[in-house]
Amino acid sequence: MFDVFGEFDSCEEINMAAQGLYEENDWENLHKLAKENGLEDMMELYESYPREDILSGEVGLCDPITAAIGKLKVERAAAKGWEFLAEDVVGYLMGNCDDESFARQIRKRGKRIEKAAERIAKEAKKNSMTIPGGGKCNYCGPMKGYQIIRDYYKEA
């Protein structure tokens, strides 16, 4: 995850990198940049923009919302062993990316769905109960889980 270009903190950083690759006519790395950031769906549109609009910075590869959703796609694909929870966390986050300021928080460097999921798991352990047969069941209600996720991403 983010092995070639590193993790970007914002759509503006991604767009600056894309613009630089575009200026160099480095299509191979431009496509790698898009894929690494979950933005491969945006490449056809990006390539259709007039050259002068890309070079002037008037248009970019992504906006805050597509940058956040792209990052979430990449993180969800990288989730190993806890995909069931990653799917729920990503589903909630994608559903709230229409709030541009929240989308920018999701895109922040170092913010990870696994860290949000760990907080949910910690909360669930507080609500542990023994089930018939001696097993344990940990539970975190959806509304509480969503609040935990939202609080995590809103932290500075």
Image (cartoon, grey):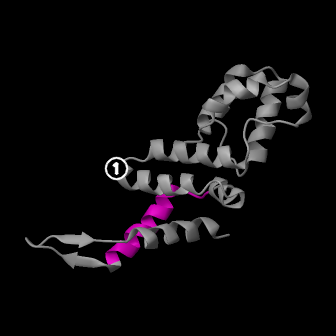
Say above or below: 129 vs 4. Answer: below
Q: Nearer the viewer, residue 131 or 97?
A: 97
Look at the image and say whether residue 111 sits in the magenta stretch. yes
Q: Amino acid at mark 1?
A: Gly
Q: Is residue 126 left or right of residue 54?
A: left
Q: Is residue 107 above or below residue 25?
A: below
Foreground residue among 146 and 20: 146
Magenta residue span: 110-125
Q: Residue at x 54, y 56 (%)?
A: 93
- Percent across and percent down for residue 100 are 71, 56
Query: Left of 7 or right of it: where is 114?
Result: left
Q: Is residue 60 above or below residue 147?
A: above
Residue 81: x percent and y percent? Answer: 34, 50
Which quadrant is home to the N terminus? top right
Q: Quadrant of the C terminus?
A: bottom right
Callout 1 crowding tier (Cα within 10 Å): few <14, some 14–19, many ≥20? few
Q: From the top left corner, tell me how far across and down residue 117 is, in percent.
A: 44, 62
Which residue is denoted by mark 1 in the rendering? 81
User: Which residue is pictured at 63% across the width and 29% down the height?
Assistant: 32
Q: Is residue 72 above or below residue 61?
A: below
- Judge left or right: residue 6 versus residue 72: right
Q: How many marks?
A: 1
Residue 39 location, quadrant: top right
- Residue at figure coordinates x 78%, y 39% from the top left: 15
- Is 124 magenta? The answer is yes
Main secondary structure along the magenta-highlighted residues = helix
Relative depth, front residue between 29 and 119: 119
Q: Is residue 29 visible?
A: no
Q: Position of residue 120 (x, y in %)?
A: 42, 68
List the single residue furthest toward the left.
Answer: 133
